[in-house]
Image (cartoon, grey):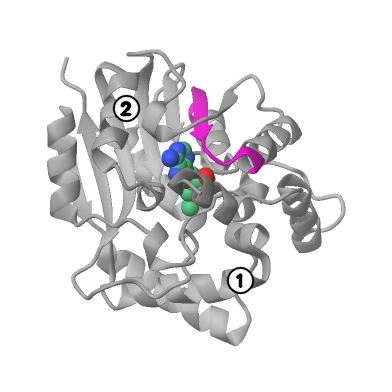
Amino acid sequence: MSMEQQVTRHYGSAGIAARVLAALREAKGPDAPVTIDTLAPLDQFHGRGPLATQELVALLKPRAGERVLDIGSGIGGPARWIAAKFDCHVTGVDLTREFCEAAEALNAATGLVDRVRILNGSALALPVPDATFDAAYSQNVIMNIADKPQFYREAFRALRPGGRLALSNVCAGPAGEPYFPVPWATIAETSFLATPAEMQADLAAAGFEIGDFRDTTAIVAEAQRRNRQRLEQGTLPLVAADIIHGERAREMQRNSMRSVEEGRTAIIEALVRKPE
Ligand SMILES: C[S@@+](CC[C@H](N)C(=O)[O-])C[C@H]1O[C@@H](n2cnc3c(N)ncnc32)[C@H](O)[C@@H]1O
């Protein structure tokens, strides 16, 4: 089985959108409105949910009318949130077919089909023409990618000159391997973490100018410590990982939280630019 097949098998399952909507009704009542804000804990599939997306958009600064690319768009929560809040057009590309189907169903449920387009494809061969996008972002995706130089070359190709790329990447920490399973991989062989220095070198080699490059591990670790206490007490609300991974999710979340707390992973937020 190829690595891409292993990734899609790790994430994919039938009926994800229906499970998201059922979890929303369970949490907020049978008549709960289906909006980007009510869905946000359930359709943003990364640590700290919409809070992390807010930090990423503070770097990216999307503008009204811009064409924005989401690389590894998952079930589309961040894409919908950004399209609606910033009045721009977002194209999401994701490898996992079931995630693309869920994203399209949730785009329809939130009335955002005109603003968010979803393409099933690989970040390593983006199904988009050259120099199409004003801005791009990728949130918690690169740890599934072995060929990181190709990931950055493709992002570079898709951006227009002067276009910007915001990244929230899980990187290798100084304290050894993460604990497995984590939400992105069941075993070490399907997890690919670069060090922050390697990330910076790969971005520069692809042609990007590095703007901001921040290590936010300490901030994330503190938030995850609080979340882990809630998880142990049974008071952590359902999040996207629970819907996607079912019974395995809580062990994965616990391992992910411990890994960042112990410096086994590092969280990097970056803003880079394709030269004019
Ligand atoms: C942890 S999820 C994050 C999803 C989304 N960015 C979010 O924050 O809600 C990682 C995503 O990366 C996607 N992915 C992994 N490898 C990929 C590849 N080679 N090309 C495109 N998407 C990929 C997976 O299908 C999955 O949706």
Q: Pointer 1: what residue?
A: 248
Q: Which amino acid type is marked by label 1?
A: Arg
Q: Which amino acid type is marked by label 2?
A: Glu
Would residue 83 be counted in the magenta stretch? no
Q: Residues within 10 Å of mark 1 (few under 14, many from 20)?
A: some
Q: Which residue is at a point 32% across and 48% down the rendered structure image?
A: 146
Q: Is residue 37 above or below residue 185?
A: above
In this rendering, the count of numbered labels is: 2
Q: Is residue 144 above or below residue 123?
A: below
Magenta range is 86-98
Would residue 90 be counted in the magenta stretch? yes
Quadrant housing the C terminus: top left
Q: Which residue is at a point 83% across and 58% down the rendered structure image?
A: 29
Element at badge 2? Answer: helix
- Residue 112 picture location, percent across and down: 66, 27
Q: Is any part of residue 160 visible from this angle?
A: yes
Q: Earlier in the sequence, mark 2 or mark 1?
A: 2
